[in-house]
Image: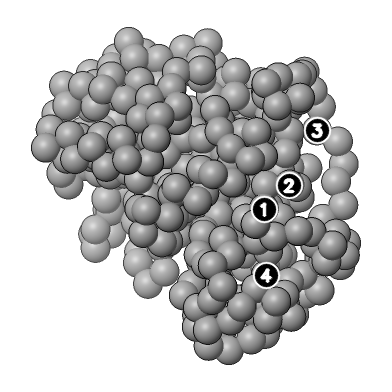
Amino acid sequence: MRTVLAGTASFFLALGLATSGHAGSRAEEILQRFENANQWRDHVMVVAHRAGGLQDGKRRFAENSIAALRDAIMLGAEMVEIDIRRSADGELIVMHDSWLDRTTDCKGEVLGYTMTELRKCRLAVEGTGDVTAEPVPTLRDYLSVARGKILVNLDNKLETADLVDMVALARAMEMEEQVVVKANLWSAERVATVKATMARVGRGFQFMPIMADDAVRDPAFVAAAGKAFAADAVEMITWRGDTEKMTDTGGPLFSAKVKAAAVRGNWHIWVDTHAIVNKPGGYLSGGRGDELAVAAGFPNEVFGFWAERGATMIQTDEPRAAINWLAANGYRVPYAEAAKPVVSVAGQAAAELSGQPTN
């Protein structure tokens, strides 16, 4: 693993390496592919946005739920993305909004509830309004289920300083070497600022830059930023804006020169096809997003388009659809460690969580 200064905004916790007693686990296989992009450019890794809780018109799971996590593991996704906030008494919890109204049967601000009170709130399936048996999960709950099975991308909804506690939790669970942090980069000054900020968090963590084509268009800068942090992946945003026209090329961040930089630097090109609320479909991916792939029925114009332009990581609201299409069209290479069936019903998740300690 290439370790560098820790970064801002969010990070991956890859669970289950040999150093933490999980030699030969699927998480170790995933990390091998994540850290060796050049050996795996024929395989597209799938990241389930909000754990995949938004798939099927937000009707299958509650977002950021343990049930969605278990489903992502069963599907064979390489990573889940979840959102981190705190309870009134300082517990790190998994919750996207600062209010509970949309995603639970409780009302009010997250910070108005202690962890004991949040345990009484039940996650709701947004698309149906159904209330599940699953309480609001803690970060520790989530990582305990993910151990040895999948990588976890934490979208930090708190202050940069809160990364210290997240890293401390990872260290206590013997997974500090598997932490990857990501942040937006757009200039040499920003690179220096991020490095200085992360020096206060500590050393020994991987960093993934995020680049957006409204600010970054120079392949030389992309290459330099990747090299500065010894990145294993770079997240590329191709803005759609308000135009109805889809990108035909992927834009400047998917040019031949950028792809050459990715090969020289041995890092993955990551694209986001997931939706953004109140924005046009494919807002982060040049109009080629999950809505076009699934609702409109043109997966080749999304998953196929980005794979053919060098993307080897796709963050999506539709991990099941993405994995099925990618596998059927030759963009997935089977793992030696077959994914084992995992019960994903909210009732069992709630039962398991009821006895979990909190950090």
Disc 2 packing (10 Å; few <14; some 14–19; many ≥20):
some
CB contact under 8 Å: marks 4 and 2: no
Find residue 312 and name its label: none
Residue 321: x and y, percent?
64, 47
Residue sitting nearer the eye, 169 or 100: 169
**Tag shown at residue 136:** 4
Q: Residue furthest bottom?
A: 107
Q: In what quadrant of the picture does the C terminus appear?
A: bottom right
What separation in Å lies between label 4 and label 1 (alpha carbons)?
12 Å
For the residues bearing labels 1 and 2, Cβ distance under 8 angstroms: yes
Q: Is residue 276 left or right of residue 109?
A: left
**Secondary structure at numbered mark 4:** loop
Q: Which of the labelled discs sits on residue 144, or is there none?
A: 2
The Cα–Cα distance between marks 1 and 3, rounded to whole angstroms, is: 22 Å
Closer to the observer: label 3 or label 4? 4
Q: Secondary structure at mark 3?
A: loop
Q: Could you tell me residue 134's position as x and y percent?
A: 77, 70
**Residue occupying the point 87% across, 41% down:** 341
Q: Label 1 amino acid? A: Arg
Q: Earlier in the sequence, mark 2 or mark 3?
A: 2
- Of tags 4 and 1, the one toward the viewer is 1
The mark nearer the N terminus, 4 or 2, is 4
Residue at 59% x, 24% y is 31
Disc 1 and disc 2: Cα gap in Å?
A: 6 Å
- Helix, strand or loop for disc 2: helix
Question: Which amino acid type is marked by label 3?
Answer: Ala
Q: How far apart are the alpha carbons under marks 3 and 4?
A: 26 Å
